[in-house]
Image: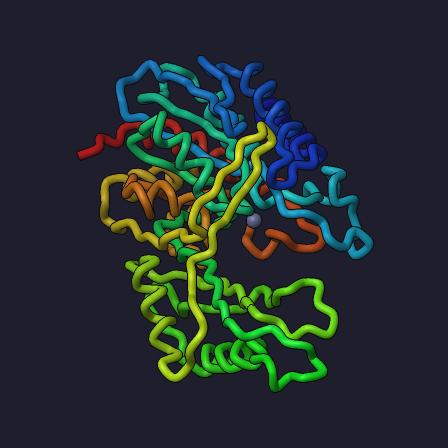
Amino acid sequence: MAYTELEQETIQFLSRLVQCVSLSGEEQLVASLVEEKCKSLDYDEVRRDDLGNVIATRRGALPGASILYDSHMDTVTVANPEQWSHAPWGGEITGGKIWGRGASDTKGSLAAMVMALGAIPRNELPGVVHVIGTVGEEIIEGASLARALATLKPDGVIIGEPTDCRLAIGQKGRARMDFIAYGRAAHTANPEEGENPIDKTALMLQRIRQTPQKQDPIFGAAVIEPLLISSLPNPSTSTIPFECRISYDRRLLLGETPQTLLAEYRSLFPDLTGWQINMHQASFQTYTGLELSVPDFHPAWLMDENSPFVQLGVQAIQSAGIAPQTYVVPYCTNGSASAGELGLPTIIFGPSTIRMAHAVDEHIEIEELLRSLHGFISLGKTMGKFLSP
Ligand SMILES: [Zn+2]
């Protein structure tokens, strides 16, 4: 199959992006590559903010709105390279696929949007586009994008995440909560002198398991799963702990807030004393040396299917020859900041499937990458026609 020059360059760019290891908080290599690529394309301005996000801005010759395209530059790590059949950081191009960590989540989206928005002829480009490669999404969704939104103030946002080139018009949210049980320390030789909080923790864990999960016809279940159990003192030798903590990951439905969430779980243990439930505070150290610390709460959101922004998106991908399917993604994205917190018109669009994200042998189909490239070109030519009310 013969590729155009733009397609060829997109494939090579993604392969190089994958070769730049960019764990959360260590995105400097990939940031330099994105910056260098944007400078070689027809962007008006390429810069980095204090968090290390790369922001490329391009002004079209046609009047229009300001639209921000976001993909995160960080990836999760590779815990088990021996299980991979291709080098996890190799960016190998073979069998119609590009292989490696981040190829789908979300360097494929990043490569396609950088190339697409830089390539649209200026006289076909309405408004202003900002393409941003964000840091730290895998640690705190939305936090680094929120910083950029505050200064760029776009009229609408497009998040690049693997949607199989469908248009996602909403997402589940995510929160992390800490359930803390208190006891009294004592020598384990005399347990009657103390009170072991691990027993209380076990009760809480069991009760949460037995409580039916809330269901929503669009969003599905309000899944809650324990992530981590720890106790203090740590390390402990022959000492009954005085504190035990379980961290839970809870997937959020539309309308849930920190207050509703805490109230829901605090009502589960009226018969127990000596415990509390808190929203976890997430912190993240950027490669530029800044410390971001925010409550680990990232709301769900849903756009009206008939809203002008969604309708323009549908029109755009349709004219790129992509079936205009809309749906709601079951995972959390930077859209929690743009749509969930700021109420900005937001859609999610990108190549490949979420099943590839964080997986062994992560890869992306080249055909799928190129489908999104043409999708982003069409979005770029179309979304700037959006006029905020
Ligand atoms: Zn991810």
Quadrant hosting residue 156? top left
Percent across and percent down for residue 291 are 52, 36
Q: Quadrant of the N terminus?
A: top right
- The structure residue drawn at horizontal position 34% and vertical position 70%, both measured from the top left corner, is 264
Q: Is residue 34 left or right of residue 188?
A: left
Percent across and percent down for residue 154 are 32, 29
Quadrant hosting residue 106? top right
Residue 328 against residue 23 in the figure, above or below = below
Percent across and percent down for residue 37 are 59, 20
**Residue situated furthest left in the rendering:** 389
Percent across and percent down for residue 303 are 29, 49
Q: In the image shown, does 100 or 385 lie closer to the viewer?
A: 100
Q: How is the image coloured?
A: rainbow
Q: Is residue 112 visible?
A: no
Q: Is residue 300 left or right of residue 230?
A: left
Residue 29 against residue 208 in the figure, above or below = above
- The structure residue drawn at horizontal position 36% and vertical position 55%, both measured from the top left corner, is 300
- The structure residue drawn at horizontal position 36% and vertical position 20%, both measured from the top left corner, is 124
- The structure residue drawn at horizontal position 36% and vertical position 26%, both measured from the top left corner, is 151
Q: Quadrant of the C terminus?
A: top left
